[in-house]
């Protein structure tokens, strides 16, 4: 299982790369679950990572754009995709517009990873719809980070079904949502392709700075080379 770490700056990106991240995810954690960074910042981080850590895959979010704002979503995907990232992450709410938005994202030509917002449960038909389209990966994440973790939002059966559906379609399955070291056994049981973290690698809430000590401990745990990790 690979480790995705969300970062907001060049400094954090290089710390994450040195600390064991397998995917570097660019977002502004203080601006919402999928808070977007300015494109100039995304470009700057991508350039630094390509210079120093050329092989690491990089994703970036477009921000928490409401699903009915289809033109804004398309414009943000174009802007972020043009920054040279490997993946563009777009939040998918559980609303009737979801299949239409997914169709538009798949037609965008960019390597989009739809991120299903799981706070109100997942709609299996929407996940199946995404899996039938040309996306490299599909994720589940939570919006309200104070309401507990992904494991509070969804039962294990639903998570198991999500991972199985995505992987059966030949795509990477990713899980996130205020995950912590204590969730490692549950994550191992589900065995997604990657798990995403921000809250767990900050000393305060997810909008505070990335803490290299917490990251190293989490990385060792997730990569199977340490007993307990820093948590809480
Ligand atoms: O994409 C992953 C998220 O940034 C994880 O953030 P979180 O651990 O605060 O839910």
Image (cartoon, rainbow, N blue to C red):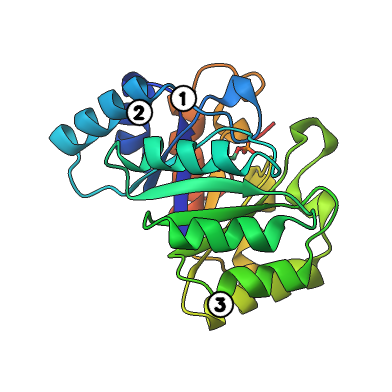
Q: Please identify the quadrant where the C terminus is shown.
A: top right
Distance CA(mark 1)–CA(mark 3): 29 Å
| Neighbours of disc 1 within 10 Å: few (<14), some (14-19), many (20+) | many
Tell me the SS state at disc 2.
Answer: helix
The residue sitting at 73% across, 39% down in the picture is 143
Q: Quadrant of ligand 1?
A: top right
Cβ–Cβ below 8 Å for labels 1 and 3? no
Distance CA(mark 3)–CA(mark 2): 29 Å
Look at the picture and state if 198 lies above or below 141: above
Which callout, 1 or 3, points at the residue further toward the start of the chain? 1
**Residue closer to the observer: 95 or 217:** 95
Horizontal arrangement in the rendering, residue 25 relative to residue 192 (left or right):
left
Residue at mark 3:
132
> Residue 230 shows which numbered tag?
none
- Residue 124 position, x and y percent, is 76, 71
Horizontal arrangement in the rendering, residue 62 relative to residue 40 (left or right):
right
Q: Nearer the viewer, mark 1 or mark 3?
A: 3
| Neighbours of disc 2 within 10 Å: few (<14), some (14-19), many (20+) | many
The residue sitting at 39% across, 47% down in the picture is 23
Residue at mark 2:
42
Residue at mark 1:
37
Tell me the SS state at disc 1.
Answer: loop
Which callout, 1 or 2, points at the residue further toward the start of the chain? 1
Q: Quadrant of residue 102?
A: bottom right
- Residue, far bottom: 168
Distance CA(mark 1)–CA(mark 2): 6 Å
Asked if one can make out residue 229 in the rendered structure from this viewpoint, the answer is no
């Amino acid at each position: 299982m690979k480790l995705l770490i969300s970062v907001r700056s060049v400094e954090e990106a290089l710390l994450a790369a040195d600390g064991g991240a397998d995917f570097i995810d660019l977002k502004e954690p203080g601006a919402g679950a999928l808070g977007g960074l300015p494109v100039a910042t995304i470009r700057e981080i991508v350039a630094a990572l390509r210079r120093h850590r050329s092989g690491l895959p990089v994703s970036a979010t477009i921000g928490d754009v409401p699903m009915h704002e289809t033109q804004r979503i398309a414009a943000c995907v174009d802007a972020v995709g043009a920054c040279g990232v490997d993946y563009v992450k777009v939040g998918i709410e559980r609303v009737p517009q979801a299949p239409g938005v997914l169709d538009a994202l798949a037609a965008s030509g960019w390597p989009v990873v739809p991120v299903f917002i799981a706070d109100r449960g997942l709609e299996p038909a929407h996940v199946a719809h995404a899996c039938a389209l040309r996306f490299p990966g599909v994720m589940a994440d939570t919006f309200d980070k104070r309401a507990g973790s992904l494991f509070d939002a969804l039962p294990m059966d639903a998570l198991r079904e999500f991972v199985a559906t995505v992987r059966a379609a030949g795509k990477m399955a990713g899980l996130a949502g205020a995950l912590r070291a204590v969730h490692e056994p549950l994550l191992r049981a589900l065995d997604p392709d990657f798990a995403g973290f921000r809250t767990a690698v900050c000393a305060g809430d997810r909008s505070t700075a990335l803490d290299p000590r917490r990251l190293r401990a989490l990385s060792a745990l997730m990569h199977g080379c340490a007993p307990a990790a820093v948590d809480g």
